[in-house]
Image (tube, helix red, strand yellow):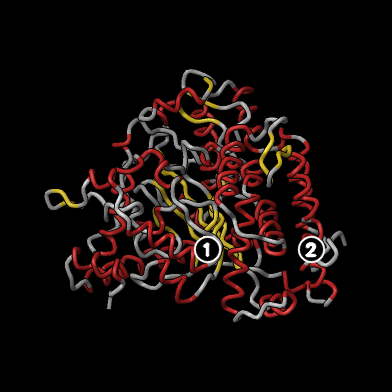
Amino acid sequence: MTIKPDSLLDKLVTSGQQHLLCGGLKGLEKECLRISNTGMIAQTPHPVELGSALAHPHITTDYSEALLEFITPPFQDTGQALAFLDDIHRYVYANINDEILLATSMPCGIMTDHCIPIAQYGSSNIGRMKTVYRHGLGHRYGRTMQAIAGVHFNYSLPEPLWPALQNLSGSRDTLGRFKDNAYFGIIRNIQRLGWLVLYLFGASPAICKAFLSGRKQKLPNFQKFDDYTLYRPFATSLRMSDIGYKSSTQALLDISYDNLASYVTALTKAIETPHPEYQEIGVKINGQYQQLNANILQIENEFYSTIRPKQIINPCEKPTIALERRGVRYVELRSLDIDVYSHTGVTDSTLLFLEALILHSLLTESPPIDLDEDRALKQNILSVAYEGRNPNLELVRGDQSVKLRQWAKEICESMRGICEVLDSATASQPYSKALEIQIEAIADAGHTPSARILAEMRETGSHFAEFALQTSHEYAHHYHSEELSSEIDQKYKNHAKMSVEKQLEIEEGDNRSFDDFLACYFSQKCD
């Protein structure tokens, strides 16, 4: 087995406990934009057949009424998570009439911010809060940016692993604190290696020219692909660049990932600190809320990071409070573009590789990230988003520069031992095969989704919107050509019915004004 002597993985193998690495829980969240047959963003409300976006456990909306979000439960097997996601797609397609789901992360069919309908969640206080929050995002960053879609990979380590890992590491912390520290170690290492996710799985090398209609200062950063499309020749994930989920205000935040306490403290400070630019917007004007508050962040979810520590929240509980009370339950990797070459938007081999990468990050030393390293890591992400397939691209590693492909190969080679352990229960070796697929993409950037997209656009003479719409129609045909089973149909009809009933129950149970509700929420005195 190709492992480093004296590593944690080596200690697990020597003690015969390497099998404890297997069986981590995997869950998915996939966003996708509802569009018309002609490719324009849908102006219709959230379909009633899909139930309540506020209370449905698996089908909801993100920023826009047209931006669907599909959520799977956690599974030990990635195939089960993908099958669950596939069933959601099949049910949704059976209930959105002639609309289709956009197969790309970067939106098309958007002419102006005002054509993007903000998501609605009913008349309850929590429903109003979710909508007001989205109005605030629109005022702060523009609506178009919020229509970008992606895939989130949720992962929690196997519970039997923790005592063994703590014993082998010699930690004297409580098990709970040991777990929290280990998860933050994963987060720091994923931030160090997160550029690799963009290189391998980035699928947004081009955008519709209209996407930058309100941000013309960004135009010089791009080349003209055709009259309707802008691109960068070596781009991997423009979604993760400074035209996507980036903010000049948030770039100044110093959110610490040293440990859970410092993370919560820094995030709480950002939520409680007023920001002059947002104060100019106003909070409540003529009785109408424009945003939840005028602080740097309205709530925790506004802070964008490529990976987050997560804990399941109780009703009206702030995410930071949930983390303080019950610790980290799982990590959420947020940097995956929608895979345009998969009808579900993500493949099994991608998920297997990401699981191995997370375990590699767990078992590798993870020192704190200082300000200099933080700046370098952010620049690495931006460089790979724009220039990742440039064969001469160098990234910053410590106090040196290193070729992307050299570093990427080193990472993958160091993952072989983990993949061998994860493959031990099956003869088909899916993890090792997933690793080899990505090693090939490192050797030849033409195998990456971003390169394939640009090549196909050139071969077919298609601008980006045409390519996106054509692919979306192909996947719509795929789902319409397969009959929805009566079992799945009834399952999601029941979910829809119960979610509507749950929303009504929440609305009828409100016994305070919205102003009082917000005050209670932010003070966490919701009883």
Residue placed most toward the observer, 380 or 253: 253
Question: Mark 1 or mark 2, which is nearer to you?
Answer: 1
In the picture, the quarter occupied by the C terminus is bottom left
Q: Which residue is mark 1?
A: 309
Q: Is residue 13 visible?
A: yes
| Disc 2: CA contacts within 10 A as few (<14), some (14-19) or many (>=20) | some
* Quarter residue 352 falls in: bottom right
What percent of the width, then of the height, locates residue 400?
71, 41
Residue at x 55%, y 55% (from the top left corner): 307
Q: Is residue 390 above or below residue 321?
A: above
Q: Mark number for residue 423?
A: 2
Q: Secondary structure at mark 1?
A: strand
Q: Measure the C-alpha gap from mark 1 to mark 2.
A: 27 Å
- Three-letter amino acid code at the position of disc 1: Pro
Rendering coords of residue 8 (x, y %): 76, 68
Whether residue 523 sits left or right of residue 211 in the image: it is: left
The circle on residue 441 is none
Mark toward the start of the polypeptide (1 vs 2): 1
Viewer-proximal residue among 349 and 200: 200
Residue depicted at x 27% and y 55%: 292
Q: Secondary structure at mark 2?
A: loop
